[in-house]
Amino acid sequence: MANIVTFVGCFLHLLLIFVFSTVLGEWNTKDYLKREHSLVKPYQSSGMNIPMWDIIGSTMVTNNYIRLTSDHQSKSGGIWNSQPVLVKNWELHVQFRVHGTGRTLYGDGFCIWYVKDRMQLGKVFGSRDLFSGLAIFLDTYSNHNGPHNHVHPYISAMVNNGSLSYDHDADGTHTELSGCEAQFRNKDYDTFISIRYHENTLKVFTDIDNKNNWKECFSVTGVHLPTGYYIGASAATGELADNHDVISIKLYELDVPGSVNPEDYKNIIPSAEHFAEPREHVDDAPPASWSVWKIMLVIILLIIVFVVAGIVGIYFYQKHQEGNRKRFY
Ligand SMILES: *[C@@H]1O[C@H](CO)[C@@H](O)[C@H](O)[C@H]1NC(C)=O
Ligand SMILES: [Ca+2]
């Protein structure tokens, strides 16, 4: 009898939680760590292999960190989860460190991926271009000094269906959904980034000031990503270098358990409804260049005024002279 009462009590309790969470559309109290998509110390359980993760390129595994590139030129490396993510709404926490001997010159940065194709070295922060899925770039080097320039290090997002190429020379500004400046390099403490993909909204937060709380970097709605893609991280150095270290990766499921069938979302083509306005970047241009234009404009206007005044003056002068001549004759 007592068992039945406990059972009924439990059932009602669960029903209540389910009804409330459905009504409120929230399940934040039950955020659930997915072990098969997480990378935590100790990395190697037996031998050299990390269960569920594969490394490529210059990546080196130590007891305390996964080093994607060392502080040397022309390196590319990556680490990839071998299990496709069958979770619709998730939050990914990556603990990382970017550090090196360069005081003013360092690069190029690293990228956190949720993409279709894994384990392919390439020219976009050490991984393939023309990717399908989501990229979060943590770009430490500004390749570009034009009007679209950002302060670096800079975090930005790109969603691709395989047709867009990442433009390194412009730091990806033409394909960026949103971004923020983030001084995460050469810190004595570990730095964190959170990528939250929930109800087609992508939110990125950072914890890079050793304050143990998340600060919003950006939020974009209308981001469509399928289930079944892979989590990874990659980095590259070129002329400039840095150590790019990943310490941990944790993926939390945000779905209400049993409410989402991942199969329903596997055929979505990655797309984004909102891109960063090019005008936003023009506003970033140094004010000096605007003053130069203003001065030029003022000079041109003054020249026009002088020319017009001159022409009018000559015209009246000639009229006056004619008048004099007429009177003279
Ligand atoms: C892929 O993305 C490009 C650029 O955003 C777009 O023009 C094209 O229609 C997309 N293709 C598909 C199949 O969605
Ligand atoms: Ca760059």
Image: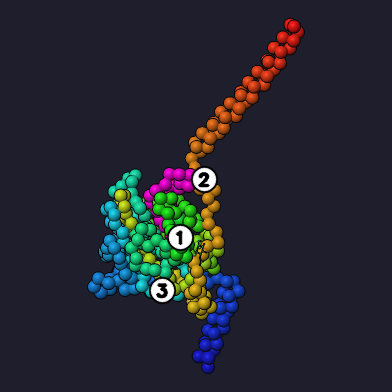
Q: Nearer the viewer, residue 253 or 123?
A: 123
Q: Which residue lies furthest to the bottom in this view?
A: 1
Label 3 residue near ligand 1, CB within 8 Å: no
Which amino acid does the dot numbered 2 rest on? Answer: Val
The answer to which of marks 3 and 1 sits earlier in the sequence is 3
Which span is picked out in magenta? 134-154
Q: How is the image coloured?
A: rainbow
Drawn side of residue 76 relative to residue 318, left or right: left
- Name which quarter of the figure residue 132 lies in: bottom left
Q: Does the residue labelled 1 lie within 8 Å of ligand 1?
A: yes
The kind of secondary structure element at disc 2 is helix
Q: Residue 119 carries which label?
A: none
The quadrant holding residue 248 is: bottom left
What residue sits right under mark 2 in the picture? 282
Query: Horizontal placement of 265 versus 317: left or right?
Result: left
Amino acid type, mark 1: Leu
Find disc 1 in the rendering and name its residue.
164
Residue depicted at 51% across the width and 64% down the height: 271
Q: Where is residue 69 in the image (x, y as percent from the top left)?
A: 30, 58
Is 168 drawn above or below residue 261 in the view shown? above
Seen at 31% across and 69% down, the residue is: 54
Please tell me the numbered disc located at residue 84.
Answer: 3
Asked if 278 appears above or below 33 in the picture, the reply is above
Hey, what amino acid is under mark 3?
Answer: Pro
- How packed mark 1 is, by other alpha carbons closer than 10 Å (few <14, some 14-19, many 20 or more), is some
Location of residue 183 in the rendering, given as x and y in whole percent from the top left corner: 41, 50
Give the mark nearest the N terminus, 3 or 2. Answer: 3
Give the mark toward the camera: 3 or 1.
1
